[in-house]
Amino acid sequence: MPTIALSTGSLYTYGLARVFEMAAQAGFDAIEVLVDHRWDSRQPAYLRRLSREYDLPIAAIHSPFVILNTPGWPRDALGRLRESVALAREVGAGVVVAHLPLRIRAARLEIFGSRRGAMLLPLPLGGEKAYRDFLLNGLATFESSAGVQIGIENMPARRLLGRAVDIHWLNDLESLLQIPHLTLDTTHIGTWGWNLLAVYEQLKERIVHVHLSNFDGTEHRLPEDGHLPLGELLQRLARNGYGGAVSLEFQPGALGAEDESQVRAHLRQALAFCREHLRE
């Protein structure tokens, strides 16, 4: 059965030790560490200590994607990827998750905190062309020398004046097939209205990591809160002998983060959902 991990990004409003504790108590096999505003998320000695204390291997390191939230780390995407690989090697993670390169930079505008009403405001700051070229021409060589797999993540549609727009390069199926290894993010597939199972069948030979969550018009929902066929996807992963991790990645609000008892219940239910379908 594939490893089932919890992404620390699911509870980015909590301290890192608290997330490890809750994942262990719920019964997760492993953890995925998102490098973010929490200094603890990029301190290898502390991460190794948490991993030992809670008996949770670190399955993956997620490279930071909000630049200003990670002081002390490189501001360019390739620099952040290199630092993430170094961190992964120090904590024994076999996979680094990284985003696709931006075509444009944008600010997200939310009305009274409503994610459903969020709008995209393009900013004249340029894209990440050098990083795009690296993914196409240099990633395979870099990965072979790094000692870890680098799973590049498919990215969601964004909304501009009510229309779906793509702010990333290489975010179509033909381009993704040019990248050595991938992280399949299910909720991101949902934002485009694509058939999740069909996309999986096209990309499955390159998938080394999975971000699992549902989509109901809002991203990163619990398995039962949306229309994506997550159960069937898990069954196919098991039948096909998928050997990577399935990492549950939710929004804190989906877990009811203001009430710790709700979080614990939701984590147990989501984990049970995954185990049930991975056994079939």
Image (cartoon, grey):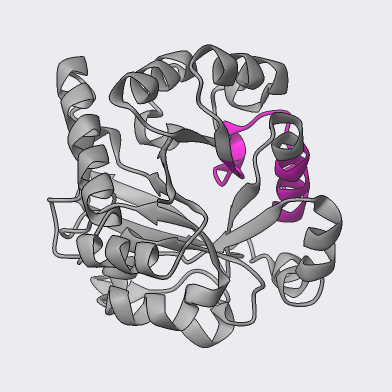
Residue 170 falls in which quadrant of the image?
bottom right
Q: Nearer the viewer, residue 2 or 23?
A: 2
Residue closest to the eye, 214 or 270:
270
**In the visual, does 165 lie left or right of 39?**
left
Locate residue 32, reporting x and y percent: 50, 38
Magenta span contains residue 85: yes
Residue 199 percent across, percent down from the top left: 38, 79
> In the image, is 232 to the left or to the right of 97?
left
Tally the numbered discs.
0
Report which quarter residue 263 is drawn in.
top left
Residue at (36, 68) in percent of width and height: 239
Identity of the residue drawn at 82% across and 52% down: 146
Q: In the displayed structure, would residue 117 be above or below residue 236? A: above
User: Which range is magenta?
Assistant: 60-86
Percent position (x, y) of residue 203? 48, 77
Residue occupying image coordinates x 43% and y 34%? 29
Apparent side of residue 249 relative to residue 90 in the rendered image (left or right): left
Residue 267 counted in the magenta span: no
Residue 258 x %, y %: 20, 20
Please name whichever residue, 214 or 115, is drawn nearer the observer in this view of the structure: 214
Please name whichever residue, 36 or 7, is drawn nearer the observer in this view of the structure: 7
Is any atom of residue 157 visible in this view? no
Residue 226 figure quarter: bottom left
Instruction: Name the residue: 33% across, 50% down.
Output: 109
